[in-house]
Amino acid sequence: MAFATRHEPIPAPVRDIVAPESGWDAGQTDTAIFAGGCFWGVQSVFQRVKGVVHTTVGYTGGTAQTANYRDVCTHETGHAEAIEVIYDPAKVSYGTLLRIFFSVVHDPTQLNRQGADIGPSYRSAIFFTSEEQRQVALDYIRQLDAAHLFPKPIVTQVAPLEVFYAGEDYHQNYALKNPHNPYIQVCDIPKIGELERQFPALFQDFRL
């Protein structure tokens, strides 16, 4: 995956969404939705980013009736395994979250898969909640592709968020609760290490 061979974090987005210096209520939050393979690893990264208030793993892209792990694993429901990130824009910007998403979380050049996890539910996707998020995400993808920072073009889908369905309780904070699981050891713990190495000023410890 991309994070395993990258020595430096990718450049920050030229265009970003920054909280205004005035008129912003203390503690006011915003929401970002990302899909980048198995949601265990995506959550394990974002919950350790300073400025992130809360994360929830779940599903988006399909219907409520099929928003459950068993159905989503058939790869026939239209859902992606995704994570809802509630964050404080005064502490971390949307563009910074995108930068971490592309640098550490996953390989954005793999279509409908991440490593050995294969199928459209593991696709790379950004589900925007506003027109501004959509434009920032699209501009950043164009910026990264133009800089040829990855060996292949980015295939990340940028789509409007319709509904986010929270996943089952046993999936929430799964990597934190099961640190000795071989899958977590191989796929997710290295991402946490890369977050701390590439973004030390943004890294925070996380415990339940």
Image (cartoon, grey):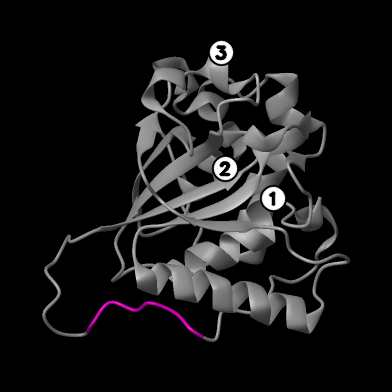
Element type at mark 2: helix
Q: Is residue 162 left or right of residue 105?
A: left
Nearest to N terminus: mark 1 or mark 2: 2
Kind of residue at badge 3: Arg
Counting other residues with Cα less than 10 Å from the Cα at mark 1, is it few (<14), some (14-19), or many (20 or more)? many
Q: Is residue 142 above or below residue 71?
A: below
Residue placed furthest toward the top: 70
* Residue at 57% in and 28% down: 175
Q: What span is colored magenta in the figure? A: 15-20
Tell me if residue 106 is in the magenta stretch: no
- In percent of width and height, residue 87 lies at 33, 56
Kind of residue at badge 1: His
Nearest to N terminus: mark 2 or mark 3: 2
In the picture of the structure, the residue carrying the numbered disc 1 is 106
Dot in front, 3 or 1: 3
Q: Quadrant of the C terminus?
A: top left
Dots 1, 2 in contact, CB < 8 A: yes
Nearest to N terminus: mark 3 or mark 1: 3
Most common SS among magenta residues: loop
Q: Is residue 157 left or right of residue 64?
A: right
In the picture of the structure, the residue carrying the numbered disc 3 is 70
Q: Nearer the viewer, residue 157 or 197?
A: 157
